[in-house]
Amino acid sequence: MKRFLLAAAFFAVLLLLWEAAFRARIWSPVLLPSPWQVASYLKNAAVDGTLAKATVITMRRLLAGYLIGLVVGLPLGLLTARWKLFRDTIGTMALGLQTLPSVCWVPLALLWFGQTEAAMLFVVVMGTLWSVVIATETGVRNVPPIYRRAALTMGSKRLHMWFKVILPAALPFIVSGMKQGWAFAWRSLMAAEIFVTILTGFGLGQLLHYGRELSAMDQVIAIMLVIVVIGLLADKIFFSPIETFLHRRWGTSQA
Amino acid sequence: MFVTRAIRLGSKATSSVSEELRVIAPSKLAIEDVSKSFKTGTGVVQALDRVSLQVGEGEFICLVGASGCGKTTMLNIIAGLEKPDSGTVRADGKPVTGPGRERLVMFQEPALFPWLNVFGNVLFGLKLKPNLSKKNRHDVAKYYLELVGLSRFERANIHELSGGMKQRVSLARALAPNPRVLLMDEPFAALDALTREQLYGDIQKIWKARRKTIVFVTHNVREAACLGDRVLLFSPHPGRIREEFPVELPRPRDINSVDLAAHATQITKALKSLGQAEVTVAR
């Protein structure tokens, strides 16, 4: 309770500072709207359904790209961990492409796919895939050999070894890779939505983009807040419970 | 104490579980002319040089020697985890070609799986045994947890256990699939003296109750004299068996007994003279 109150106080102070900056008229109100203007935009957008629709469209794109990234990335990571040939080829490629900021995929995607959903999906998959590959590979290669040996003596081999020993042992790494992948997917999608202005669906990134076009700063800030809150919620609802479980089982620190 | 509880539990169980918990004949091991060398950064190390060794059914033998003398390599070869360069290992006349649940290993560091709880760890090997229903597997796992005195901790996570408890779980996990041979690689080396003494008592009781052939690797001479029917002395570079000491003391043996100390002193002396020989040769 005390922690909650302290956190609430922190955010209240942030809001007060913002309001104070607005009242002091240091910047033009066009550039810095008051918290109330942002709140009233959010209220209107929530009431007329703009916000819900945009969120659903964005989440759909995000989940589709993220899931493809996971489904392709996990096996690729296992392959690179298992065979040198894959490590030297796909592993090296993944390492290189992981360092490429995902927004760099946008020009290529636009030329290949045009202003389509496919372009956005491609950018999100590229943003997610490589970090999942790397995390899975790292996780598998960090499994202490003694687990494998112990399992071997008990008669575990091949698929059983992979699914009942190697993968569970690598789970902490894989989950942090999934988390990183999620963050990257989110980033790539926003980059894609801002640059790919299509009519098949108006996502949060596009709302952000048009906020800028219309110089509607309340809209820009409001949408940014929404994006931050969705990121936080995903972390708290999806990743936190898994991480808590892993910490409890493995006995690693509850950070 | 463990034993009486164990027998009661066993007789109460269903027929298939009692079949699973049946005391089976331990294996005879025949190791003939086994050699093994490793390439290291500084050259080739001859870990084992034409080592031959016979272990009788249900015998408890201890391999003793300085670190790096090849005793762990010997254990891994018997387990089937490593292949010898030459020579053969036979268990009951059949050549050992790979790891198998007839010969289970208890490692120095507890190789327990952190993603499973205590019960899941003991269950792991049982799940790999065909023809065992879920209920029977659970009963067997419970039996062995009771045997090592950890029934209360079956839902505990591995990191919540003390070092001694971890090794007890390792022992239960190794015993659960009812192997004929138990291979123990310095299982108590990382434990404190008090816990170790308790485990010496327990392992002797369990060995008597479950009848296993045990090959026990250690660098602790007293421990070897306390547990082994025979103590085999290894010397390094190249790894060879140099001497053999039968220990004919009544069981259960107490690590602190005077008779045992006399045996240990004799073995230590031999070990030291080996060390001297090594030094002279090196010069």
Image (spheres, coloured by chain):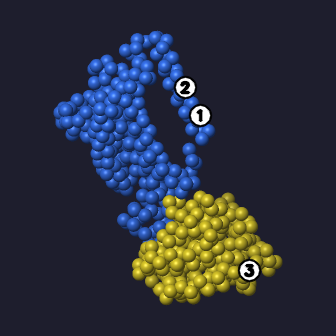
Is A124 on the left-hand or right-hand side of A242?
A: left
Q: Are marks 2 and 3 on the same chain?
A: no
Quarter-of-image position of residue A251: bottom right
Q: Which chain is blue?
A: A
- State if disc 3 and disc 2 touch (CB < 8 Å): no
Q: Residues within 10 Å of mark 2 (few under 14, many from 20)?
A: few
Q: Amino acid at mark 1?
A: Leu
**What subunit carries mark 2?**
A
Residue at the image position 48 percent from the left and 80 percent from the top: B136
**What subunit carries mark 3?**
B
**What subunit carries mark 1?**
A
Q: CA distance from mark 2 to mark 3?
A: 72 Å
Q: Quadrant of the N terminus of chain B?
A: bottom right
Q: Nearer the viewer, residue A89 or A54?
A: A54
Q: Nearer the viewer, residue B249 or A162?
A: A162
- Residue B129 in the image: state x and y as whole percent: 44, 77
Query: Which residue is under mark 2?
Result: A13
Please identify, in this view, whether the residue under mark 1 or under mark 3 is nearer the observer: 1
Q: Which mark is residue B253?
A: 3
Query: Which residue is under mark 1?
Result: A6
Is B133 on the left-hand or right-hand side of B229?
A: left
Chain B pictured colour: yellow
